Amino acid sequence: MTDEIWGHVRNELMKSIGKNNFSAWIEPITFHSFDDGIVRFLVPAKFIGSWVSQNFGDVILRHLISAGIGADRIEFKVDPSAMASAGNANNAPASDMQSPAETANLGSGGRSGGNGKGSTLPAATLNPNFTFDAFVVGKPNELAHAAARRVAEGGPVSFNPLFLYGGVGLGKTHLMHAIAWELQTRQPQLRILYVSAEQFMYRFVRALREKDTIGFKEMFRSVDVLMVDDVQFIAGKNSTQEEFFHTFNALIEMGKQIIISGDRAPVDMEDLDNRIASRLACGLVVDLHPTDYELRLGILQTKAETYRARYPNLHIAPGVLEFVAHRISTNVRVLEGALTRLFAFADLIGSEITMDLTQECLSDILRATDRKVTMDEIFKKVCEHYNIRQADLIGPSRARNNARPRQMAMYLCKKLTTRSLPEIGLKLGRRDHTTILHGVRKIEELMTVDSQIAEDAELLRRMLEA
Ligand code: ADP
Ligand code: MG
């Protein structure tokens, strides 16, 4: 592979992942080398490698493959020169290739087809972080977790096939990898194959092209446990589905365990072959529900704990994790990304993770998932809390018992909404933006010396965000 090809792939990536992601995560990485099916990149810091690998690994691989690069996987290496200039002690040694362990992978094994061509197929990897220990259980995922645990115990196959479904970033892949790790520990002799449906298709198409469908069939039918992730990808792709169906049946008949994931229930996948859908429905179908506040907070606390080991000098101010759990209500991947960024940012500037730093560092994510606390709600709550009338809050009275609540309202509007100072001023009795700024600063200042004010602010914030 050449720098030109990487240049082309970068352009494609920009289109598919968007400008922001591109500049935050792809821009900092540089192409290093390509051999043995492994494309290596240099990254300025370890966390960028992990981040890119987890979030964009698949799309990068996909674009490399469509650019004609026969890549099996990608790896990230911390750039020693970048590390020296950043003076960052948290980076791994440069030799520490940041890549999920190469396991449960039959693709490069000896049984991938008589002529060995199969060995250059995209390899399946298991993420070492996706274990049961690292999976936080809450109401929304307890059933899926219990089913996964049961299957991971091995023994006589009770749930076959196991079908896990749910929206993006809710832990489907995590649970599948966790099953694979657990099974492998308990029964090392098991042949476990984890592939994304996309990889299944690539392998199949390649086998067709290379006239090695026998090798393909042999490989897939020789496993004890087959896991196919994101099956929706092959819905509508007819010859791949057909092949998948046969593989599936052959394995079920042999009493082998199959675990599949998808973004919807089998019956809701319109383009999925009916025969596959009904086969899937014969096993156990469980879904992962959208996260709730408790689960999100639990996940954040668990992840923050692991970060604390890595960044022992970083402190998180009280309330920050609760705030993030409230405000980021989309998927867990976004939640994790936010935390990664927070730690990286705080580490970079050598600061504690305060509420202010959090708001600044995550402003783009917070805006996107804004819970839309309105200024009217803030005014109402402030009036209730201080027991004053809204007319006095907004009106001109300078009496202390009106002025302080008014400043509190200014502060909350600034912190909890995305309104600008002039907008807040306009709404709050046509006041000038400098008055608003002064009010916000006044409360911030008082919060550090007056515990009553700090408590009021915290209480109001919690009520408004709940
Ligand atoms: P999906 O495959 O459903 O799109 P993933 O399994 O890739 O989602 O999960 C996205 C990210 O969120 C992963 O980094 C995963 O470790 C993390 N994650 C999801 N659910 C949990 C959970 N319950 N506990 C801990 N981490 C989780
Ligand atoms: Mg997934």
Image (cartoon, rainbow, N blue to C red):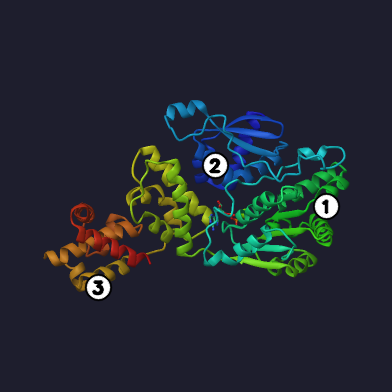
Q: CA distance from mark 3 to mark 1?
A: 68 Å
- Residue 9 drawn at (x, y percent): 63, 38
Residue at (54%, 35%) from the top-left corner? 29
Circles 1 and 2 in contact, beta carbons < 8 Å: no
Q: CA distance from mark 1 to mark 2?
A: 33 Å
Residue at (61%, 46%) from the top-left corner? 127
- Residue 147 drawn at (x, y percent): 64, 64
Q: Which mark is residue 50?
A: 2
* Residue 49 placement, left or right of 179: left
Q: Quadrant of residue 411?
A: bottom left
Q: Which residue is mark 1?
A: 221
Quadrant where the N terminus sits is: top right
Q: Secondary structure under badge 1?
A: helix
* Residue 214 placement, left or right of 327: right
- Mark 1 / mark 2, whichever is N-terminal: 2
Label 2 crowd bin: few (<14), some (14–19), many (20+), radius 10 Å? some
Label 3 crowd bin: few (<14), some (14–19), many (20+), radius 10 Å? few
Furthest residue toward left: 399
Q: Which mark is residue 318?
A: none
Q: Secondary structure under badge 2?
A: helix
Asked if one can make out residue 167 in the rendered structure from this viewpoint, the answer is yes
Q: Which mark is residue 384?
A: 3
239 vs 55: above or below: below
Three-letter amino acid code of the residue under disc 1:
Arg
Three-letter amino acid code of the residue under disc 3:
Glu
- Residue 393 drawn at (x, y percent): 20, 68
Three-letter amino acid code of the residue under disc 2:
Ser
Q: Quadrant of residue 103?
A: top right
Mark 2 Cβ and ligand 1 under 8 Å apart? no
- Residue 26 drawn at (x, y percent): 54, 39
* Residue 310 placement, left or right of 416: right
Query: Which one is in front in this view, the residue at disc 2 or the one at disc 3?
Result: 2
